[in-house]
Image (cartoon, grey):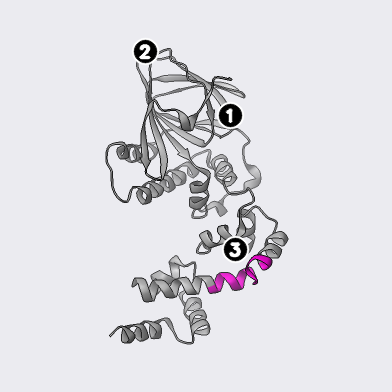
């Protein structure tokens, strides 16, 4: 397929995009139209109308209205419209960086990663909830908002959770994890994900390192152990949210990665010499 184009470069589509990213493409193709592509993102396509034959290196399959299908990145595919009416679909692109960010917020611990399917393509039923989520993403073609990036990231997270709840949940987990399991820059990774409620083993795995390599590189990078650094980072973050952003104490503790309010309060006092409530009162007095 030497004439294949990158999916990212396919421009015969309406875009769900913001100044910073393209989240999805709404595509329309006519009977007999062929489209050779190189899939450079993991994608989910929800079929709104028509029927298409998709030819991949590992096999062919047909999709029709009411179905959805997943294609893993790194594949050459060709497709041909085989229905009389136009084929329309919403193609949601799971960019690696964004997927990695959202992945750490998912309940992936419920899945046994040793049982993943190796299939790089599979069909799923577009359930009413998946269809509703896709419809809400498609609305952003014509409706703009200053908070589009934030809303669309929530929509992608919603779609990811719905996919995990499908019969192919473990297979989807495999591809979502592939966005993280490459070796990341450790400093950038930890600065971005310190507030996630993960164990040290989980941080190591998601950064693409063995636990011993993770601890060794962490010490060299931060001059501290992972546990000590995480505690201090989360406390400083929570203190800022409480004193500067007006967060309630419990809310600040939760979004900073603390599971226990008692543990947070005790650690806060040990770190800063006063309780969170006393810190708020002192801040209020200094502002008067």
Is residue 252 in view? yes
The picture places residue 127, in percent across and down from the top left corner, at: 40, 36
Q: Secondary structure at mark 2?
A: loop
Above-or-below relation of 19 to 270? above
Question: What residue appears at the point 40 percent right and 33 percent down from the top-left corner?
Answer: 25
The picture places residue 256, in percent across and down from the top left corner, at: 47, 67
Q: CA separation, marks 3 and 2?
A: 54 Å
Q: Which mark is residue 75?
A: 1
Q: Could you tell which of marks 1 and 2 lies nearer the N-terminus?
A: 1
The residue nearer to you, when weighing 34 against 64, is 34
Above-or-below relation of 8 to 175? above
Residue 171 location, quadrant: top right
Q: Secondary structure at mark 3?
A: loop
**Tag 3 residue:** 199
The residue nearer to you, when weighing 146 against 24, is 146
Instruction: Give the residue at the far front of this rendering.
Output: 19
Q: Secondary structure at mark 1?
A: strand
Q: Could you tell which of marks 3 and 1 lies nearer the N-terminus?
A: 1
Is residue 247 in view? no
Left or right side of 123 for 250: left
Are the residues tagged 1 and 2 within 8 Å (C-beta)? no
The picture places residue 172, in percent across and down from the top left corner, at: 54, 41
Q: CA separation, marks 1 and 2?
A: 27 Å
Q: CA separation, marks 3 and 1?
A: 34 Å
The picture places residue 16, in percent across and down from the top left corner, at: 36, 38
Check if residue 231 falls in the magenta segment.
yes
Question: What residue appears at the point 52 percent right and 60 percent down from the top-left corner?
Answer: 193
Q: Quadrant of the N terminus?
A: top right
**Tag 2 residue:** 84
Residue 52 location, quadrant: top left
Which span of residues is magenta-colored? 219-232
Q: Main secondary structure of the magenta part?
A: helix
């Amino acid at each position: 397929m030497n004439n294949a184009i990158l999916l990212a470069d396919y421009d015969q589509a309406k875009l769900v995009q913001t100044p910073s990213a393209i989240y999805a493409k709404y595509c329309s193709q006519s009977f007999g139209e062929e489209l050779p592509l190189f899939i450079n993102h993991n994608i989910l396509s929800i079929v709104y109308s028509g029927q298409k034959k998709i030819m991949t290196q590992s096999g062919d399959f047909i999709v029709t209205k009411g179905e959805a299908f997943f294609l893993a990145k790194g594949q050459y595919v060709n497709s041909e419209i085989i229905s009389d009416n136009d084929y329309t679909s919403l193609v949601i692109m799971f960019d690696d960086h964004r997927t990695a960010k959202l992945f750490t917020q998912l309940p992936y611990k419920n899945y046994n990663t040793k049982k993943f399917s190796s299939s790089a393509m599979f069909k799923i039923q577009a359930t009413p909830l998946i269809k509703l989520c896709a419809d809400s993403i498609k609305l952003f073609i014509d409706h703009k908002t200053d908070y589009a990036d934030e809303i669309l990231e929530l929509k992608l997270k919603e779609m990811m959770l719905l996919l995990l709840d499908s019969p192919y949940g473990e297979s989807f987990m495999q591809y979502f994890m592939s966005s993280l399991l490459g070796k990341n820059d450790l400093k950038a990774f930890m600065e971005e994900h310190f507030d996630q409620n993960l164990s040290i083993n989980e941080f190591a795995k998601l950064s693409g390192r063995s636990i011993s390599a993770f601890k060794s590189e962490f010490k060299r990078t931060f001059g501290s152990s992972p546990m000590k650094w995480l505690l201090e980072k989360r406390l400083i973050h929570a203190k800022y949210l409480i004193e500067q952003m007006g967060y309630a104490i419990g809310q600040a503790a939760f979004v900073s990665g603390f599971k226990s309010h008692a543990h947070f309060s005790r650690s806060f006092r040990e770190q800063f010499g006063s309780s969170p409530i006393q810190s708020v009162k002192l801040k209020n007095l200094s502002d008067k």
